[in-house]
Amino acid sequence: MNKTATLVLNRNLPDITNTLYESLQKHNGDLTDLYVIESGSSKDKLSKYCSFWANWEESLAHGLRYPRGFNYGLLQLLESKKYDQYDYFFLVCNDSVFEPKPIVGTLLQEMTTHPRVGILSPCSEKWGERSLLKDQQTKYFWHINHVAWFVRRSYIDSVRQLDNPTHLNFLYDGDNFRGYESDIELIAKGYANDWASAVTSKVRVEENEDLLKTRFEAMKTDDFRTNREKVFQEGNRWLRRKYGFNHRWTMQMYAKFFYDKFFEFYPQLSAFKI
């Protein structure tokens, strides 16, 4: 068994997921075990590589989205006694596009080079973070878009739900259904527990944004505009209910507080601060 598990999230797009799975398997199968999480897919839209199928009524009707979806996949590994056998988890949304070459080995090497990094994200050429990297290929950030995260298990174990974990609370807060600011919440928790989050340009990822625009009906979800409105509306209600914050910038300043404190405790890592 490899020390990395790659979890690919699918909902009703088996062709996209199968292509991604096969590319990852071809170029990285020697370093990672691959699992496909069916996040409320219809029976006739399952990936041929399906590992775990969330097929109860609510998930089939609404899907799990990425917070509940990755919670569900990690929980299945825990319940099958496989979770503790992995040191890292590569959490990949199926709209991720990677170069057809080995990438897991590069990510593993970066985690070895940066032992206090809990979350490592490949970088998109379109991201503003790319310009902030400048001459360095890896730096620590307090905000990273969740497309494909390479996550250290020891980080997960420092922040995850230990008592009665479910698909609603294993790692992500499942009450935040569409995941608005879920990424920055986990980054803040990381820095509060001495774990940094980093972006590296040594591995490139792009997000196929056209999928939600052109195939939302197949995915049994809202169109791009409606979904975006619901992300903000529902997410802002969650943010106020849980944290008492009225704006996402407050959440980002909350994360940056722990980010700055991290470098006070680890001044030797200041070279990686943006």
Image: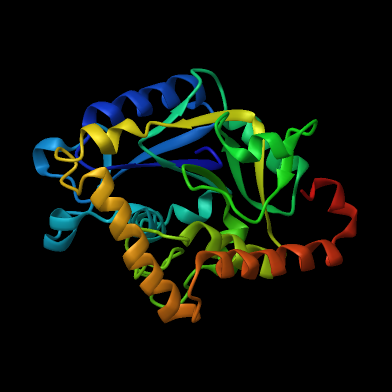
Q: Relative to 187, say whether 17 is above or below.
A: above
Return the x and y of residue 180 as percentages of the image width and height.
42, 60
Q: Is residue 140 visible?
A: yes
Return the x and y of residue 268 as percentages of the image width and height.
90, 54
Residue at x 50%, y 34% (from the top left corner): 32
Q: Is residue 193 visible?
A: no
The furthest residue to the right:
268
Q: Relative to 212, say whether 141 is above or below.
A: below
Choose top left, top right, bottom left or bottom right for residue 76. bottom left
**Near-viewer residue (63 or 7):** 63
Left-right relation of 188 to 132: left
Return the x and y of residue 113 as percentages of the image width and height.
77, 41
**Near-viewer residue (205 or 113):** 205
Q: Relative to 157, say whether 50 is above or below.
A: above
Circle count = 0
Residue at x 53%, y 37% (from the top left corner): 2
Residue at x 49%, y 20% (from the top left corner): 27
Return the x and y of residue 16 as percentages of the image width and height.
28, 28
Residue at x 44%, y 73% (from the top left corner): 239
Left-right relation of 187 to 11: right
Left-right relation of 148 to 138: left
Q: How is the image coloured?
A: rainbow
